[in-house]
Amino acid sequence: MGFLRDLFVNVVLTTPLVGAYTMFALGIVFIYRGSRVLNLAHGAMAMFPAYIAYALTGVAGPYAGALIALAAGGVLGLSIERVLVRRLRPAGPTAQTVGTVAALGILIALAARIWGTTPIHAKGVFPDKSFAVGNSALSLGGIALFFIAIAVAGGFIALFRYTDLGLAMRCSADNRRAAALMGIDPERTTAVAWLFAGALAALGGVLLAASTNLHPYTLSLQVLPAFVAALIGGLENVSGALYGSILVGFTVGIVPSLGGIGKQTGAPQVALAFLAFIVMGMRGGRFAATDVRSGL
Amino acid sequence: MKRLVGFALLVGGIILLPWLPGVPLSVVINADYAGELAIVAISLVILTGWVGQISLGQGAFVGIGAFTTGLLARGLHIPFPLNLPFAMATTAAVAALLGVVALRVRGLYLAVATLIFAWMADAYLFLSSWFVGKGGASTIRNRPIGRPGTVTHFDLSDKRVFYLVVVAVVAAVVFAARNLRDSKTGRAFFAVRGSETAAVSLGIDVAKYKLLAFAVSGALAGLAGNLLLTDLRTVTPVTFAFTQSLFFLSVAVVGGIMSLGGAVASGVFFAALNELFFRVELLNGYVDIVSVLLLLVVLLGYPGGLGALGPDLVHRLRVAKSRRTQRRHRAEVRRAEVRRAEERASAPAHIPEPGRVSRFARRLRLPSLRSVVVKLRPRRVDMPRYTIDPALLAGTKSHGPASNGERTMVVPPVVAAPAGWRVAAVDGFALPPDRGQREPVLRARNVIVRFGGLTAVNDVSLEVREHEIVGLIGPNGAGKTTTFNAIAGLNEPTAGTVDLFGVDVTREPVHRRAQMGVGRTFQLIQLFPQLSVFENLLVATHVHNETGFFSHVALTGAATRAERDARDQVTHVVSLLELEDVAHRKIAGLPFGILRQVEVARALVTRAPLLMLDEPASGLDNNETDELARLLYFLRAQLGISILLIEHDVRMVTSVCDYIYVINRGAPLADGTAAEIQRHPDVVSAYLGEPAGEMAREEPVHAGR
């Protein structure tokens, strides 16, 4: 029974990660649908607003700080789209991807320049209270992160399904020209996608920074599992991103508790890589379907 | 002469750079680094630029190369030049393994997969003690090569000496990559990137070439890793942190993702940045920001990359220089055109010389026994291959009228062109009047295709026999293209069999069917937009080129000969279809009618005795459709090619087809000759929707039938 109890404890302890990954994966999916771009700057789009929230907490208090950081995240997303991704569209997806790499580099360098590279413990929006789970503790902020993420994901799924804006975004993701012919401005829906993605990344970053640490590089890399989650979900699928995040979050949490090989450094990454490759092997046909169709 | 001297000076300068007066050691060190970066960039140019597989994991490949080198040098005491092939082979194998993923997923999905791979290598592989040694770093000692004190003594630890090694390796890599680009392999790469559907239809094994690209790219990255470790002697996992992969991709993109020269230039550019930061103290602490900003400047200001910089400058100079010559040239062309038009008006139509009639199919092997074997071990068996006589395509041999030479097509007066297809073609392959006496080339029996619950094709059987033009018609959504794709292998039939040249190919992949001798065109044109017309046609010589990868890399005599043959073949087809004027123009930007012709030409270059054309006349005007009909008739009558044709244009189908199948809602409706079909009441009501009387009154384009 000890093993099962450990497993349960680990699952519970992983919930904040699931929440963060969900928010990041949703943003990655929005951006992929909006621009057909893999946004490698997503980690930096979470990290930079987290620093902004940290810097403003002293001046404006934690709530105002977080809200401003959220807005800043949205603006950041918009400007990356305007300055880099849109202008690089004629040069092709590889150039666009490298454009987001450049954004990643610049944001990390700026953060390191302004706030330094020593890890900082950021004070969270929620009171510093925690609950004992097994031998560890789960902070209130962590629990909040999970539930906020689930609520946000549900909200976005509803938005896509039931609102005009959602419909417009879905159809311009499918076919920009056809959407334009129906009177939808695809540039606008793309901008909205980046705005949402930026704000979500900021929210995830601010909440995650409270339960881990603030560091320009490390915090940016926290987003990597979310790429796996988005890929597992199908990269275009909003609800898929949610399921993918749950799978990825629990894998990251559970693998070390399996002991033995699982305890080694990098074991979660290896597990995630295998997970991703298995899912790709299974769904491959569906991933590849578009090209075949257009050829016939 | 001036050029030669300049070139010699440049090469000499590059080689002697470390020994030139006033060149500090730091420059030499960064020059070594430039070479290593250039090789990584070239590995990405091949994989991402040529084959279109975005790799965010190149840093991991370089790391694997470096650590393999370290393992060999430390553990087995295998020193530098000897451990190089091992490092390349190991990395190539790992890369090919990752390439298996690329067989399942495409585009940015693959990019994420490579990202995950790099991240895993970074977080696990490069930290595990069995791979990188106890200290977590790979440290090696380089043994000098040769005896000390002699001329052949190479102390690899001397950065100046190592510079020579780097220069030699970079030169060799650029040479090999250039050869590859201009070979059958390179064209197959471009084809995979341009359109996988078209590539398989030309007999290119897409899976093989994707894996090959990963292996080649991995080998080059491993080579770079090997050089890097030999150069630095110590590398830590941090050297290959996964962000390094992103940096490498940036280097390749700044160079211009397709360009070899650009890759080298970009390597030099980033190494020069290093040197700059080392020299200018003011920049200290701003290294990251400044280099990213420079990256952005190049990316946004020059999306073509550094590789386009040189050709662009040369082009601009040339344009400025030759403006006057151009004007003179244009006037000349105009005069020549007028002269030609006058000559054409006075010359009589030219009819090809009569010659001997011969059967077209040169069977290489007996199919009957093989078809059994094919079923048992489908992947191992060499399929028989059928081709039409290249001499026919070249026009050095032609077929005259058959005994019943009256069966010619009545076509509008011909604008004369010497011996081309625009001439009223004379039938060299007359068909026996009884269809049963014609030998079947293609036989689809009881083909059923279901997509989920939808039955798209229900029990369709059709045959194409030797030298026939067979039409497959039906209203929109009747299942014509689905039937077509089941025959070509693009989708597998739920039930039924497909025989090609008497061999059951139901379970064979598309490229194997194409290799047997099936050429095809697509409803939505599938040409390679980045290539010129001539290059598009060259891709189609793939099936007939027997030379292999290594002979392409080393540019052997066999490879050169095969290349010349390929060009000859394409030249023949270009002149046959009178595409000379557009031969060296890029596909992107050519008019639609020309593109249709190029697609037919590309299918012709494969020398396939069976062509499958999917609505070749869609989007063409009446004149162009007439021309196309004449061309098809020429192919049948003069080259003996059998044709299966999907078409909407009833006038065209009834004018050229020897036999017609009609399907409706996925099921067969009728089949017969054009006259029979036109009279068939079901066809008239279901498809044509006109009273029979009006159809009968329509003038048939055929005569003598």
Image: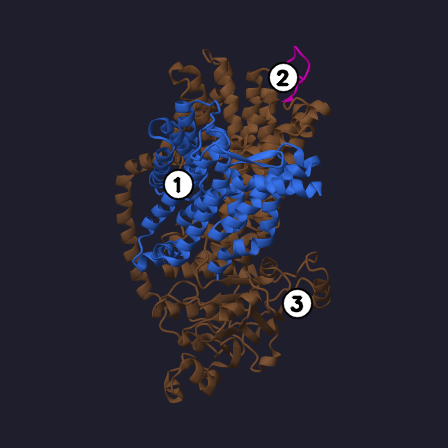
Q: Is residue A99 above or below residue B208?
A: above
Write down the region rendered in magenta: B138-154
The alpha-carbon separation of the residues under discs 1 and 3 comes to 56 Å
- Residue located at (70% from left, 23% from top): B74
Judging by the rendered image, the residue that carries numbered circle 1 is A198
| Mark positioned earlier in the residue sequence (3 or 2) | 2
Q: Secondary structure at mark 2?
A: loop
Q: Considering depth in this image, is B237 or B586 the residue closer to the camera?
A: B237
> Residue A135, can we see it?
yes
Callout 1: residue from which chain? A
Q: Residue furthest bottom?
A: B693
Identity of the amino acid at label 2?
Answer: Phe
Residue A208 at what x, y percent from top left? 48, 35
| Quadrant (top left/top right/bottom left/bottom right) for the N terminus of chain A | top right
Q: Is residue B512 above or below residue A90?
A: below
How is the protein colored in the picture?
Answer: by chain
Judging by the rendered image, the residue that carries numbered circle 3 is B504
Judging by the rendered image, the residue that carries numbered circle 2 is B154
Q: Which chain is brown?
A: B
Q: Is residue B149 magenta?
A: yes
